[in-house]
Amino acid sequence: MLSSKKMEEGKKKLHVLMFPWLAQGHIVPFIELSKRLAKHGLKVTFLSTPRNIAKIKPLLLGESGKIDLVELPLPRVEGLLAGAESTADIPNEMEALLKTALDGLEQPFEELLGRLSPDYVVYDFSQYWASTVAAKLGIPAVFFLIFTAAVSSYMWVPERYKEEETTAEELIVPPTGFPSTQIAWRPFEARYVALAFTRFSGGVSAMDRFFKSIQGCSFMLIRSCYEMEETFIRYFERATGKTVVPVGPLPPDLPQKRLSEQESLCIRWLDKHPDSSVVYVSFGSECFLSKEQIGALALGLEATGLPFLWVLRFPRFSEEECSPSVLLPEGFESRTQDRGLVYSEWAPQLQILAHPSVGVFLSHSGWSSVVEAVKFGVKLVLLPMNVDQGLNARLVGGELKVGLEVEREEDGSFTEEHIRTAVHKVVKEECEEGTTVKSRICEMRESMFGNSEWEEKYINRFIKRLEFSTSTN
């Protein structure tokens, strides 16, 4: 008789191929899940394009030999910028062309799967065809949603999928049985989101890709947890008829690499301020404000009287001159120079949020930013800008109560006063909102990220699901 240890050693190592959409906000959660699976002894292959793989390598320091990086070059597509391999390489209006280029990988992907023969393919929404290709080869495909369960269950349930055009009026109404009265798109948000349902020239819309990805998968993963979103996860399962497996929020660890001289500037500036005194402002790598929005936000920060670190990024492909000196209100920088830093380079967000002087994060409500803020116990002021962010803000502010959403006018605009009021309410702990946000974020941080076994529970459940499915195939 073989001992249990020998039997364990003799088991075939599960092989999972990870295939994210070509955007940094998607690639990073796929990397984080890959690292956790590799840590548990699974063989992981990470697939992307050559330029993305080159960018990924520094994120895998210490993971050498555990994750295989594999490249597939994108085919040339007319109208797409030469060398473009991610959403960071193109203006927003070219995203459809990037998806067309990605669709050109279907045949090379099939050939690659035939050679590698993984046990599972974990894929993203844009390459909806990955599940069909995998099925031809008898390989189960798992759809990984990097969005919240609230967003997913509001958007991608069967009743939303229809032949005729989806209107903004329909999108402001939650689907049948949706488990929240607080989460819904506002009219100004819904008008923007409705464009994602449009099938230009009879092609595949962005939302078609989500629905087809759900239909073709064996089951779904979601970057969330029961502690945050159990009612939405259960609702999504019932509505789609698919098993939904949460893998936790997957926050990245603080990078071990040394910061550059430029990156260290932010940290040295924060070192000069008392604990929990600074308002950190950032809208992610691909969300850019208009001149009017920049002006209102600047005057609002000035009116708070608080120290602030504002990471103000500009689109690479704008024809207009973009710099703080051009777009900030006249005299703003000189008036706030003693307590404010406007920083226009890439900023080390994790190190900033982990710094003791940061007390509030004014954010666009991207899910990664929310998760990172909760991990480090930083209170949130929420100013959503596009796509999923409005629903995230209502989840975070309305359901979870770890942040406060900035009030807006009906057309989505906001003023100096809107910004000042929201920040003051969160900062002042004698206010009901400030007290609630502080207690809730401390509670959530401690229960989830203060417990090393908590995340392990979710990863182990996912691996057991893979092992069970493999043994029954």
Image: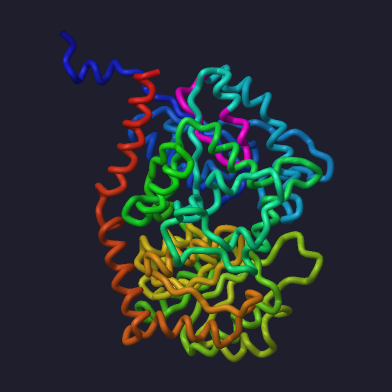
Q: Residue at x 41, y 83 (%)?
A: 425
Residue 5 rendering spot, x and y as whole percentages: 20, 20
Q: Quadrant of residue 201?
A: top right
> Can residue 190 be seen by looking at this rendering?
yes
Frontmost residue, 381 versus 91: 381
Mark count: 0
- Image quadrant assignment for residue 440: bottom left
Q: Nearer the viewer, residue 407 or 96?
A: 407
* Residue 304 x %, y %: 49, 88
Q: Is residue 51 above or below residue 306?
A: above
Please report the residue visible at 33 percent of the width from the left and 51 percent of the height from the top: 226
Note whether residue 89 is visible. Answer: no
Residue 63, relative to residue 150: is it above or below? above
Direction right: furthest residue: 78
Q: From the image, which quarter does the N terminus lie in?
A: top left
Q: Is residue 51 magenta?
A: no
Q: Position of residue 330 (x, y in %)?
A: 69, 88
Please tell me in which quadrant of the rendered image residue 353 appears: bottom left
Question: Is residue 77 placed above or below 194 in the rendered structure?
Answer: above
Q: Is residue 378 left or right of residue 172?
A: left
Front in this rendered view, residue 69 or 191: 191
Residue range in magenta is 117-131
Q: Position of residue 265 (x, y in %)?
A: 52, 70
Magenta portion: prevailing SS class: loop
Look at the image and say whether residue 130 sits in the magenta stretch.
yes
Left or right? Give the position of 465 relative to 341.
Answer: left
